Image: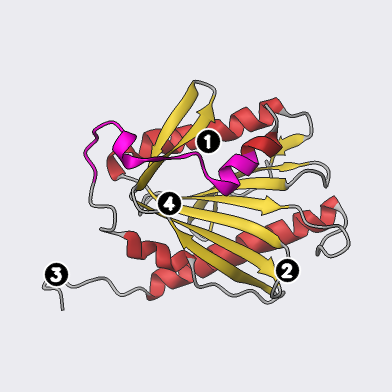
Amino acid sequence: MRLLPVAIVLLLSSSTVRAQNAPNTAQSPPNIRADELHNYESCTFDDGLQIARIDSLPPGVQQRTINTTQGPKIIQMLAGRRIMFAYGVGGDFFANVKPELLPADTWAVEKRDLLDELAVMVTSEHDILPNKNLPDTIHGLEVHGLDRTELKGGTLGIYLLFDNTRHIATSVYLLNQQPLTRRFQTIEQYNDLRARFLATYTGCIAQNQSLQTPAKKDGR
């Protein structure tokens, strides 16, 4: 299995399937806490990177399929976004970020399956390595990821950010760009941009969460 085809499938469609084809499982209403994903949608960067596009899950889509060492697994979603980041207006996309609100009762299992999918990618390619220099958390979000060792293919890095309190799993796809216009020309420069993106973005999420006013019990 090649990383690039897997990443492209994840990038474009995330292997989503319609909810009417899903097995009957008890879930909270899809939009019960979807407003928590707004914390992922309003971040600014000091190097010209900006949010270029935001999409919600299509109506009726509440699950997607991933590949693990145990075969295909289903990820149930209460809500989700696709947030595209680019350098400058009309620039090539640098990051495709997908925060997904998952059910609390299946959080532990789905988190394990998402991590297992990373393990499959690492074992399938000789030029893909897990990032072992990551701290356990960045601004309160548990972080895991992998990168290519060379600037080739459409996706250079895939990272998972876990908010274990709010049950939000965020998949971050760091994208290659046209060599003449991209902001990095060496793998070291890519690594620097990746580290800056993860630090800035997680810091922005944490700040947005700290500013969010909890709803009062009487609804006022």
Q: Identify the residue position indicated by label 3 in the image.
A: 217
Mark found first going from the N terminus, 4 or 2? 2
Q: Measure the C-alpha gap from mark 4 to mark 2.
A: 26 Å
Mark found first going from the N terminus, 4 or 1? 4
The answer to whether residue 188 is visible is: yes
Q: Which mark is residue 191?
A: none
Q: Compared with residue 171, is residue 50 higher up or lower down, i.e. above or below?
A: below
Asked whether residue 25 is drawn in magenta, I would say yes
Q: Residues within 10 Å of mark 3 (few under 14, many from 20)?
A: few
Q: Identify the residue position indicated by label 4 in the image.
A: 100
Q: Measure the C-alpha gap from mark 3 to mark 1.
A: 36 Å
Q: Identify the residue position indicated by label 1 in the image.
A: 115
Mark found first going from the N terminus, 2 or 3? 2
Q: Measure the C-alpha gap from mark 2 to mark 3.
A: 45 Å
Mark found first going from the N terminus, 4 or 3? 4
Q: Compared with residue 168, is residue 3 higher up or lower down, i.e. above or below?
A: above
The answer to whether residue 77 is visible is: no
19, 142: nearer the viewer: 19
Where does the image place residue 41, in percent across and percent down from the top left?
Answer: 49, 68
Where does the image place residue 122, in percent across and percent down from the top left?
Answer: 67, 31
Residues rendered magenta in the picture: 7-27
Identify residue type, mark 1: Leu
In this rendering, position of residue 184 left or right of residue 204: right
Identify residue type, mark 2: Gly
**Disc nearest the viewer among 4 and 2:** 2
Q: Identify the residue position indicated by label 2 in the image.
A: 91
Q: Are marks 4 and 2 in contact (CB under 8 Å)?
A: no
Q: Compared with residue 206, is residue 60 higher up or lower down, i.e. above or below?
A: above
